[in-house]
Image: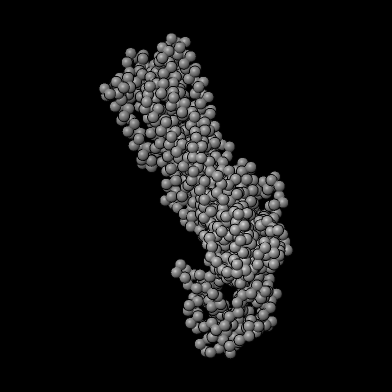
Amino acid sequence: MIATATGRGSWHTLQDSTALSRLGSTATTGLAGVDVEARRARYGPNAIREAPRRHWSWMLLDQFRDFMILVLLAAAALAGLTGDLEDVIVILAIVIMNAVIGFVQEYRAEAAIEALRSMAAPMASVRRDGRVLTVAAAELVPGDIVLLEAGRIVPADLRLIEAAALSVQEAVLTGESQAVEKQTTALDDAELTVADRSNMAWKGTTVATGRGTGLVIATGMETELGRIARLLGTAEAGRTPLQLRLAVFGKRLSLAVIAICTLLFAAGLLRGEPLMLMLLTAVSLAVAAIPEALPAVVTIALAIGARRMVRRNALVRRLPAVETLGSVTAICSDKTGTLTQNRMQVRVWYVDGRIHELPPREREGTWRRLAEALAVSNDVEEGADGLVGDPTEVALHEAAAMIGDTKAVAMQRLRRVAELPFDPARQCMATMHAEDSGDHVVFVKGSPEAVLARCVPESVDAGKVLAAAARMASSGQRVIALAMREQAARQTSSTEMAQGLVFLGLVGLEDAPRPEAFDAVATCQAAGIRAVMITGDHPATARSIARELGMLPEDGRVIVGRELETMGAEELEQALAGPVAFARVTPEHKVRIVEAFRRRGEFVAMTGDGVNDAPALKLADIGIAMGRSGTDVAREAADMVLLDDNFATIVTAVSEGRRMYDNVRKFVRFAMAGNAAEILTILLAPFLGLPLPLLPIHILWVNLVTDGLPGLALAVEPPERGVMQRPPRRPDESLFAGGIWQHLLWVGSLIAGLALLGQAWSLGGGSEGWQTLVFTTLVLAQLFHVLAIRSERESLATQGLSSNLALTLVVVASILVQLAIIYTPFGHRWFNTVALSGAELLACFAIAFTVFFAVEAEKALVRRGLLYRAGER
C-alpha cells in the first residue's frame, strides 16, 4: 500500500530509506514504467491547476452593478425624455467606457494563476527502470527519483537522498536571501518551517550549486507552490477607497435629486406653469444635478497618473491602484530584493583584534594576506553576464577586489595546486597555492568555530574572536572565518592540509539595503505611512536591516512565524499598534498580517517579488511587485509593478496617488457647487415671484459643457506643495471632508443669489435678455470659480495661470463660446438667447469676479488656520 504523498507532511523527519519504502521506490532504479502510469492516473499531472474562470459575460455585467453607474443610466433615460440625443450619447459613452475598463482590468487580474503554471520546470532528469531519462516535468509522479544539478529548477517537492555540495536558492518561496545548503539527514522537529527543512527541495526553486538526487513526495497542487496557488485563488481583492466614497456619494446624491426635482415640479404646477415645461425642466435639472463627467474625470485622472508613473518606472496594472496608493496607511514590505539588493556583501571586518566597518587605507600584513585568501580560495568564475558561483563566494570575491586584487590577478602569483572541498561535517574548505618563490600557502575559510579549532593557539585569542563573531551574528550577518599556513613543500595529506593555521580574520556578510531605500522609508514616515518589514529571513537579519533603514526603533519587536501562529487575532492587532517587524514567515502568515491591518481599519500596500508574496499582494488594498527581480506570479498578482525594483519609486507613486485624489476632490468641489447654484436658482425663483430663470437647454449646456470641460482639465492639475508632508486620509473619510460640503453650499448659494439679483435687476429695467443674463452669469461664475479652486490652500497668484495651461485655455475657449451663443444668430436660434447690453454683460463678469474673490478669501482664512482646520489634512 503506497502512502499518500503530500508536501505538508513530515517527510523531512523520515530517514531516506523509510521515505523510499513508503513510496515504493528505490534510489538506484527508480519506478517501473507500469507504476508511473498508475500513479499518473491517481495523482494527475504535475502542474498548477488553473482556477475556473467566470464567463466573460458575467464579468461584463458586473461592471454595471455600481450604484453611480445605475444613476447615470437613469440620467440617460431622463435626458432621452427631453429629446436631446446628444446628452444620451454622452452619458452612455461614459458608462460604456467605464464598463470596458473595469472588464479589462478584471480579466487581466485572472492571469495570476496562469503565471503560477509557468513556474514549473519544463523538463526534468528522472531515474526510471534503472535508466536516466529526460521527461516533461508535468509527467513526474510521487516516487520518481529526480536528478538535480546547478542551474536547474526543482520540478517537484523532493525529499533529498543525495546531496553533494548542494545549495538551493529559495528566495522566491521563503524570502531567504542566500542559497540554502542542503543535506540528507532526517530532522527531528516535525514543525519546522519550509525554510528550515534542509533535507527538502521545493518545486519552483533553483539549484545554486552542487548536485543531488531527490525522491518526489508531492506533485502539482500538493506541492508548496500549489498550496500558494490555492491561497492566491481564494484571496479576495477589496474595492478602492475612491470607489467606496463615490458609491456613498452617488446614493446620497440620487436621493437628493429626486426630492428636489419633485419639489420643483410641484411648485411650478402650483404657480400655474405649463405641465410639459415643468416636466422638461425637472428632468433637465435632474440631469444637471448629476455630475455625469465625474466617472470620466476619475478615469482620466487615473490614466494621466498612470502615464506619469510609467515615466518614473512604476507600471500600473489596475487604474484605481493609483488612487489607492495615495490612501495607504501602511506598507508591508518584503526584505529580500525589495528593501535590500538581493546580493550578499561583506559589511563588517574583524582583523588584528578589531572590528572594522571599512578596511583601512593602508592594507599591509594581515590585510594583504586576507585579501589574497578572499581572492583565490573560491570557485567563482567570470561569466558572460557577470560573476557565476555561490552567492557567498561571489560576495567574498567582490570583497577581495575591494581591498586587494581581483581573482584573475591574484591567481597569476598564487596558482592553485590542491583543494579540500567544503564538507558540512568539517564546516570549512581549503585551497593550496604555489607561490612564485616555490613555497606554498594554504588558505582556509569556514565557520569561526571550525577554523579556530585548526589554528595554533599562540596565533589567536579564540575567546575574543568568538565573542566578536557572536556580536556580528547577532546583527544578522553570516560570519566567515579565514586562516592560512605557509609551508615550503606541497602538502598532499588532506587531513594535515587544514591544520596548524594562523588566524587572519572574520568577515560578516549581509544582504545590504538599497541606498535609495533609506530616503524612501524616511519620506514614507514623514507622510504618515508605516513601513513594516515582513520577510522569511532570519530574525536577526530582519532586525538589523529594519533598524538600519529606520523602520524599527531599538525597542521595536520582531515577531517570528512560530510566535505568530500562537497569537490570536486580537493579540496580533495589538502587536501591529506598535513598532514591529516579522521574520521567518510563510505565505499564510503574510496573508494573516495583511488581514489584521485591514481589520484595524488601515489601507495596506504590500510589496514583494517572490512566489511567496503573491497571495498577500492580491489581498492587500494595493499590491506592488518588483519588475526586474520579481517573479511572473508576483507581477500578475500585483496592482502595480516597479520596473526598476526601486523602493523609492513607491514614494513617487504615493505622491501621484495623492495628487490624483486631490484633483477628483477639486472636481467635486467645482461641479457640485455649480450644480447647487443651478438648483437653488431654479428652485428659489418661483418663491421670490420671479419667472423660471432657465430653459432646459440652458441647464444641459451649463452641466455638460461648462462643467464638463473645465472639470476634465482639472485632472491634469499638478500636485500641491507639501503633498507628502501630510498624513494619509482616514479610511473612513468622506469625499466631502475638509470643508467641501460647506464650500459647495455657500458658493452655490452665493452664485444663485447673485444670479437671481441680476435677473430681478434686468426684469426691473424691462430688458428682454433677463433669461440670457442668468444663463451667462451661471456660466461665467463657474468658469471663474474653477480657476479659484485649483488649490484648496494656495492662491491663484501663487500658482500662476501657466501651471495648468490646459485649464486656462479651456476657460478662455468657454468664455468665447458663451459670447458666440449670446451674440450670433445660431445661438439665438438653438439656445433661445438674446444679445445682452454692455451693462448686462459687465454685470455678468462682475458677478463672476465676485465669486472668484470670495473663494480666494476663503483660502486665505484656511492658510491662517481660521477655517476648515480638518481640511488641512
Residue at (58% x, 43% y) in the render? 236
Residue 393 drawn at (x, y percent):
56, 71
Residue 517 x, y percent position in the rendering: 53, 56
Image vertical order of residue 801 relative to residue 513, above or below: above
Q: Which of 723 and 270 is in front in this view?
A: 270
Instruction: Relative to 348, say whether 807 is above or below.
Output: above
Task: Name the residue rendered at 60%, 77% in the picture.
Answer: 421
Quarter of the image for residue 208 reads bottom right
Residue at the image point whose x is 49% and y is 43% from the top = 107
Q: Could you tell me if residue 259 is visible in this image?
A: yes
> Which colouring convention does the figure follow?
one colour
Q: Residue furthest front?
A: 34
Observer-nearest of 628 and 99? 99
Work out which quarter of the rendered image holds the C terminus and state it. top right
Residue 228 vertical position relative to residue 297 in the rendered view, above or below: below
If the image is split into quadrants, where does the N terminus sit? Answer: bottom right
Residue 371 as seen in the image, left or right of residue 808: right
Query: Residue 291: where, in percent of width, then height?
Result: 45, 30
Residue 618 horizontal/vertical position (percent): 56, 47
Is residue 495 shown left or right of residue 139? right
Q: In which quarter of the image is residue 610?
A: bottom right
Residue 560 visible at all: no
